[in-house]
Image: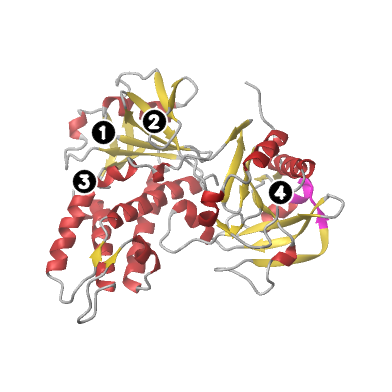
Amino acid sequence: MAHSYPADLADFVRERWQDTSGLEREYCEITAEAEALPPPAVLTRILSICYQASLLREEERPVRFRLMLRPPDAFPPPGGPPHGLHRLVFGEPRPLTQDELRRLAPAIDFYRGLIGAHVDGDGKPYIWGLITTGPRWVQALSGGRQSYQRLPADLVVRVTNPGRIAACKGLLTIATLIGGRIIEPSLDIFDSNWVPTLFNDVRGEVVELHGIARANARSPWANLDPSVVDAIALHAVRRMVGTIRNSHHGGTLLILPPEGPDSLAALDGRISLKYAFSDEEPRRRFRTLLVALMNGLAAAYGPRAGDTPRTVGWNEYASVADSGIALLDEGLLELAHLIAGLAASDGAVVLDKRVELLGFGAEIAGDLPPVREVARALDAEATRKVHESVESVGQRHRSAYRLCNFVHDAVAIVVSQDGTVRFVKWHDGIVTYWDNVATSVLDV
């Protein structure tokens, strides 16, 4: 297999740069000052310098940074987080070199700022200063109730690991160079039709519990859009996955069919759970929070006397200024951090499809039938896929394949230490996996 390098990445980005109109408004701040890509030789030079910087270390620390190609006068001086960008211009510009990037990378937090760069009249790239963004942009990755901050539709280069760089338009990833391969991000599994079906069981329960609370409410409540349950549940799972990724230790989530307290017993010892939780409300905390959020949202938008009840959904949830909902949302975030912490231990975290936390430290029995071949999905619904051998993956992935081969209703989410997120399930007669490569910032 021929390997790709920064020059190949530059060519790929130039071909795809204009083919993003359907996504720009979601991930980019469209401004009149947004610039076209620099000439081919300059773009290649910039990506090559960033690639070389990724291979260096600064006092034994890996070099991680975000760099934006945008002139300093395109940033309003009074701007700043949480809703704007705070520019800091050096008294003297610095040359854009790998050593300069190595020295600057520790000075500005990857999740809170960028290195500002531009190209002079002679076509030479230089560093003019620093740009503080604040962390809200990460909500496009890890989930969040409030709207996340976009970036201008200019070239942004993200360096996350040795030899791993991404070329972006604002927050919109155009292509990523990983291990000598160029990957075009086009597969965000959270946008699929099948992922929301994971929550069919919890949806029915929480809707019933919400209906009981509504009947006993002392004042009128707004109606809820039925899709808000799935939206909040997906938001919570995205947070769990994003939190595990950000920890850089990897982990596995196993989501089993709901069999009540007998979810594991039904597997006849195929999963050994080292730390099982007692069957009580705390392990069902997700459902408790979800019902409380639905009740709070309906109450917050309840009609005044004489008004017709309105129907509210995700947009209202994302923008409501209600302290009670904010606290419940914080509870969801803490649950995501809890599960991410459990995933750091040896073994998998086990939930059922009601997002009931059964335990952690799970091992999948070695006597399950081996899986020699799996399918890699090429789109969110796996209408296109290719078959692959399992020889190149580690034990964590093989265990997930064996489980989904044995339990066709199970879903495994495997997060590698390098940040790769793989969803695994039985689909159309074969174990199938999706590498979740989002169009936004999932690759951080």
Side (left or right) of 172 relative to 397: right
Q: Where is residue 333 in the image (x, y as percent from the top left)?
A: 39, 58
Of callouts 1 and 2, which one flags the residue occurring earlier in the amino acid sequence?
2
> Which span of residues is magenta-colored?
94-101
Give the CA separation, mark 2 to mark 4: 34 Å
Residue annotated with mark 4: 37
Which of label 3 and label 2 is nearer to you? 2
Q: What element carries label 2?
A: loop
Of callouts 3 and 1, which one flags the residue occurring earlier in the amino acid sequence?
3
Q: Is mark 3 on a helix, strand or loop?
A: helix
Residue 98 shown in magenta: yes
Q: Do the residues labelled 2 and 4 touch (CB within 8 Å)?
A: no
Residue annotated with mark 3: 201
**Residue situated furthest right in the rendering:** 122
Q: Which mark is residue 383?
A: 2
Q: Is residue 358 visible?
A: no
